[in-house]
Image (cartoon, rainbow, N blue to C red):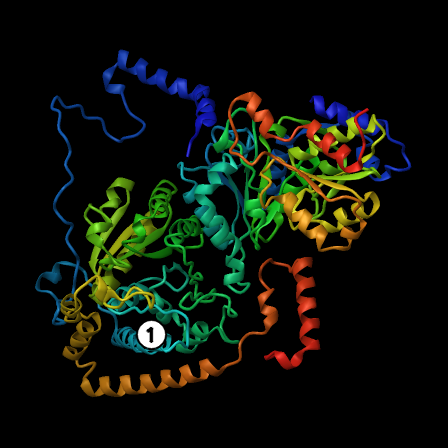
Amino acid sequence: MAFSISFQSSILTTTIGVFKRSLSTTRMLANKQMTVRDALNTAMDDEMERDERVFILGEEVALYDGAYKVSRGLYKKYGEQRVIDTPITEIGFAGIAVGAAMAGLRPICEFMTFNFSMQAIDHVINSAAKTFYMSAGRVNVPIVFRGPNGAAAGVAAQHSQCFGAWYGQCPGLKVISPYSSEDARGLLKAAIRDPDPVVFLENELLYGNQYPITDEVLDKEFVLPIGKAKIERKGDHITLVAHSKGVELALEAAKELSSVGIEAEVINLRSLRPLDINTIIESVVRTNHIISVEQGWPYAGIGSEIAAQIMESEAFYHLDAPLIRVTGADVPMPYTKSLEIAALPQINDIAEAVKRILGVKDV
Amino acid sequence: MMYSSVMLKRLTNLNFFKKQYMLYSSISGNIQDLSYRGINKVNFIPTLDINEPSLNSMPIFRILDDNGDIVSNCNSVPVIIPENDELLKMYKSMVLLSIMDKILYESQRQGRISFYMTNEGEEAAQIGSAAGIHFNDQVYGQYREAGVLLFRGFTPEQFMNQCFGNIEDLGKGKQMPVHYGSKDLNFVTLSSPLTTQLPQAVGTAYSFKLLKNNRCTIVYFGEGAASEGDAHAAFNFASTLNCPIIFFCRNNGFAISTPANEQYRGDGIISHGPGYGIATIRVDGNDILAVYNATLKAREYVMTNTRPLILEAMTYRRGHHSTSDDSTAYRSKDEIEQWANKNPITRLKKFLEKKNLWNDQYELEYTKDTKKQIMQMFAIASKKNKPNWKEMFNDVYYEIPDHLLEQMNSLENHISHYPEHYVIE
């Protein structure tokens, strides 16, 4: 909540001419809000209503409405054939989902958290992602694997890992990492309709956040294109590129920097694969500086991939300084709060990195 | 997996407390009302016993003995003997499979294909079960089910095109040898990681149940594959979701080099049935008529009851696991020889001879013709062009994404500049 208020105020202080695009989707906001949880819930509801082949399976998704209440009310509405509580075996229900998709259904496979998807990763990578290729285009596997990903709060190493880079590495998968309610709703609906397998990485800490939405977003036919990033905030001095919770941090940092005269552009990736490198390049050509922000590990991470793709593009020649990655620390997540904070990127880390790149001394 | 944060959530679940409360209140009330959610019938006893597993083995159903005679007490069972044409089709398929195996196995030894797996010894389990299911039923194989695919209509040319990955390979050169698949024949492209086919087959069976399309799924696996977690997840899901599926286990004695008696300690694979609440049949896997009848009965059961069934075919893998091992390193030649006498092909041949449907002359002609044809097909398949290089980029996604299109265009440009260095087919 605290965040969404500051987000609106940052928009209100901007001038209309420059921010036409963001204003056009946020004008009515002030009165319409939706949580990410409800955005995901209504997206599934819409798509289950629209297409009988869509069903949900996972642990606790039916009677208990989902461990995080994302599937609330769907069991009641669609019944036990389409909202299925499974025995506790990720390897089992991920495999069931693959087989059901091969046979013509459109499963939404909920992992209670993506940390537990490791038990089922063989089905995600070796079967879901590769079957279309291995069958030479005869059998597609339209599944959405979804659930909370990345760091939550106080749940330590085995509940706090970001799998964006893991799944993002595999051709055949599409990987989405939404930030706001608009992202969650538009992209989940698109993912359910997509003919390819999609890994949909949610964030537990964002579930309860409210974000402004428009009537357009509430439309049953509203979908967002998979593979397109969104510029959340315009700025000319530096580009901050982030996904999921990282977008929130980047926007907060941008707001702080604005008070010292630095205008950062914030790109919300939305999709990690395909990666919208063109939007990043166009931004860098204007700002000549870039920082990537993610909560996951630095090694072979999303920021590393962006750095590599910039090196291979003409954007490289527009850089006035090397890219800096602001990431989680290269350690398993510690439990103790003070250590957890130290292991995750903070707003201040981003602001410091920006000042370092721009050669700005602390005011 | 259920971890700490989730456990906390569960503990705060009101239903949890409600259940506990109901249990305690019923104890203090009328004792006869007591029931556990986890078992069917309550029976308290005053003696403390450890329940040892039974040492008895479940019997094996067979129709033909080693001499190809119908076993004497078989009259008590309503056995179905296929029509003569069907019997001959079954026999010829077995022989053709073994001939094709020999040729493709040799071709791997000569370095002409990268990999091969033979079906020797398990021809009856494959063909008998293939004859017992409907064409519309969905088949998931493990990797030693070429006979099932052959019986469903996959041609020897198609097998060889796949092994060579040539331009006519249905898989367009994307899958390693023996990883066949045919959507037209309802046979899912094989997956190398062991046992992934089991939960996936359950998912397909579940779809069929929802779609009410009168189809079932049959999924093949070895007794070694049953050690994977996937198998147990699949049994449990099939049972709890009431899926129409036949789990067809080829218990062939070896998981690569590990003998079955080191693979598990229960009574084979059907011993899992009671644990998961699944019906079972055990059959002589080298007796094609028994396998055929067992599969017919299994199919009828899974369709009528919308329930799973485990069918365990007891057999012996006479060939090596694959071209990547030499089985004489872990078993004696004597043992292999002993099983040669129980050859499932010979057993059916003896039965057919007694019915005057087959003789040595037919055998000679058929094997000679088949060998010749297959050698010809082999030569043709090996010389066919390979798929266009563009195939490399196709079918990664339903629609080709921009970055792959860019790479394809860039490669096309490159090749058009240096055509002398590339074979364009």
Chain containing mark 1:
B
How packed mark 1 is, by other alpha carbons closer than 10 Å (few <14, some 14-19, many 20 or more), is some
The answer to whether residue A264 is visible is yes
| Above or below: residue B140 compared with residue A97 | below
Q: Residue at x 66, y 26 (%)?
A: A209
Q: Is residue B135 above or below residue A276?
A: below
Secondary element at tag 1: helix
- Is residue A190 visible from the viewing direction of this image? no
Vertical comparison of B88 with A207: above or below:
below
Question: In screen coordinates, is B226 left or right of B333?
Answer: right
The residue shown at (59%, 36%) is A202
Q: Out of A174 and A169, give the one closest to the viewer.
A: A169
Q: Quadrant of residue B322?
A: bottom left
List x then y, in percent, for residue A81: 47, 40
Q: Residue A70 at what x, y percent from top left?
A: 57, 32
The residue that label 1 is drawn on is B105
What type is the residue that disc 1 sits on?
Tyr
The tally of labels here is: 1
Name the spot of residue B16 as percent of width and height, x first: 41, 21
Foreground: B16 or B320? B320
- Residue B199 place in picture, x, y as percent: 40, 49
| Quarter of the rendering containing residue A292 | top right
Quick one: quadrant of the N terminus of chain B? top left
Left or right: B286, with B243 as reference point: left
